[in-house]
Amino acid sequence: MPTQTAPASQPRKAPNVSLGAALLSEAKALNINVPQAAEAGLARAVAEKRAELWLEANREALESSNAYVEHNGLPLASHRPF
């Protein structure tokens, strides 16, 4: 799942975030843009949580669909050329 950062046109906020001193030192030594990396990591975490919540909300429908295919096979399977 691709991650996205906020477009430059969106308003920005400066959150109060505490980071481990050793990790921050290593990131700086490696010339990692810490705010950019933090934003990318947060975007990834948000996307993962959204996917998890979507799966929970749609679990019943997915299980129902899977049960239908297990019992009846794939719809239009007889028309598949392979």
Image: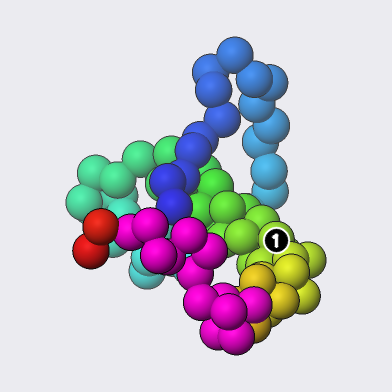
Image position of 58 with respect to 6: above or below:
below
**Magenta run includes residue 71:** yes
Q: Identify the magenta region.
A: 68-80
Q: Residue at x 51, y 35 (%)?
A: 5
Decide if residue 1 is on the left or right side of residue 25: right
Position of residue 67 measured from the top left corner of the image (x, y, whole percent)? 64, 82
Neighbourhood count class around disc 1 (C-alpha, 10 Å): few under 14, some 14–19, many 20 upward: few
Disc 1: which residue: 54
Decide if residue 68 is on the left or right side of residue 20: right
**Magenta run includes residue 77:** yes
Quadrant of the drawing holding the C terminus: bottom left
Of residues 7 and 71, the one nearer the viewer is: 71
| Residue 60, image quadrant | bottom right
Position of residue 54 measured from the top left corner of the image (x, y, whole percent)? 70, 61
Q: Residue at x 46, y 45 (%)?
A: 3
Of residues 68 and 6, the one nearer the viewer is: 68
| Residue 34, image quadrant | top left
Colouring method of the image: rainbow
Image position of 7 with respect to 40: above or below:
above
- Judge whether residue 59 can be spotted in this image: no
Position of residue 71 measured from the top left corner of the image (x, y, whole percent)? 60, 85
Could you tell me the amino acid type at mark 1? Trp
